[in-house]
Amino acid sequence: MRDPDARFQQLALKLKDRGYRMTPQRAALLRLIAASEGHPSAAHLYEQIKAQFPTTSLATVYKTLTLLKEMGEVLELGFSDDDNRYDGSRPYPHPHLICVRCHKISDPDVRHMDDLTEEIAAASGYEILSHRLDFYGLCPECRQRA
Amino acid sequence: MRDPDARFQQLALKLKDRGYRMTPQRAALLRLIAASEGHPSAAHLYEQIKAQFPTTSLATVYKTLTLLKEMGEVLELGFSDDDNRYDGSRPYPHPHLICVRCHKISDPDVRHMDDLTEEIAAASGYEILSHRLDFYGLCPECRQRA
DNA sequence: GTGCTTGCAAACAGTTTGCAGATAG
DNA sequence: CTATCTGCAAACTGTTTGCAAGCAC
């Protein structure tokens, strides 16, 4: 996402439209989500918000993330053995590159997913609604250190 | 896997080779894994084993699954919002089709994954070790009922 | 003023672990 | 015989929920 301010406005408006209230805690989270280039965890977002609103609770972070998820404005990457990560810049399914050593997550360019999805749908009889593609490996930095 | 017996022997031998002991509980789990066509959860395997060995504990199922995972003989599919599933027939990464309604998991045919993986590796500088590709949708049966 | 939102703490679910007794080799 | 394995129960972790007090509108 190139313009964090615009994205923030977009998210704020969407919340308002759905009848949700704007609170300082939500504003802070929305700003973080809008500005974040990476794939922060709920705990990470919580730490950053606490710097501005020391009394904010993790539960509130989760509650707002759930809201954004339901509105389709945030993509949740669930991991069974690690905490979940959130992407508010690209809230649609897209591939991820996950470093198994430093846990960094990045977004590679992959083109053929739509073709692949259609192919699977046709062959299986499924109605495909979403997908998830993760590559696990060592990022360039960790390869050097390995 | 076409021959459950052969697969069972294979798994049993591998355990023995690594110096692990064969117990009735492990044998029962290995047989289930070897025969299973689907993607059972630990709890599901546990229920089936209890029918033969009523005193078996879930912890033992997990401990043996961990062993098989470490030996690369079982593929674990972790879900952050559901229990993990295990595939002892195809213990290598392969795509999955997951029905969001009935939670059935099946294995579609997808060819291009190796090409895609190499492409990503070249473009990103990562050393790619593994991957995971899941499609979420409605299976043919659930589409009708929808 | 009304009722959505917050923050706390307790609950939750699946998985893992510690340990004493049982057992495979 | 001895080290591994089992079964139980407690611990663990990230996430969710119930509820009284607070605040947006």
Image: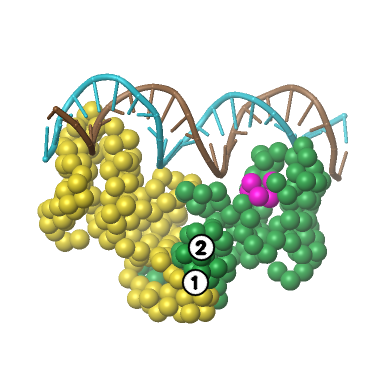
Chain colours: A green, B yellow, C cyan, D brown
Magenta residues (range): A42-46
User: Residue C1: where, in percent of width, then height?
Assistant: 87, 29
Give the labeled residue for mark 2: A99
Residue closer to the observer: D25 or A59: A59
Which three-letter amino acid code belongs to the residue tagged 1?
Tyr
Which three-letter amino acid code belongs to the residue tagged 2?
Cys
Give the labeled residue for mark 1: B126
Q: Please tell me how crowded label 1 is: few (under 14), some (14-19), or many (20+) other residues with Cα within 10 Å.
A: many
User: Residue D23: where, in percent of width, then height?
Assistant: 85, 37
The disc numbered 1 marks a residue on which chain?
B
Residue closer to the observer: B54 or A129: B54
User: Residue B32: where, in percent of width, then height?
Assistant: 21, 47
SS of the residue under disc 1: loop
Image point (78%, 50%), residue name: A28
Q: Quadrant location of residue A124? A: bottom left
User: Residue D2: where, in percent of width, then height?
Assistant: 19, 31
Queried whether the magenta region covers residue A44, the answer comes back as yes
Q: Is residue C24 above or below residue B120?
A: above
Please give left or right for residue A51 compared with residue B94 in the image: right
Q: Is residue A92 above or below residue D17?
A: below
Visible residue check, residue A118: no
**Residue B102, numbered circle:** none
Residue closer to the observer: A26 or D11: D11
Q: Mark 2 and 1 residues: CB-CB less than 8 Å, in contact?
A: yes
Please give left or right for residue B3 compared with residue A75 in the image: left
Queried whether the magenta region covers residue B37, the answer comes back as no
SS of the residue under disc 2: strand
Visible residue check, residue A108: yes
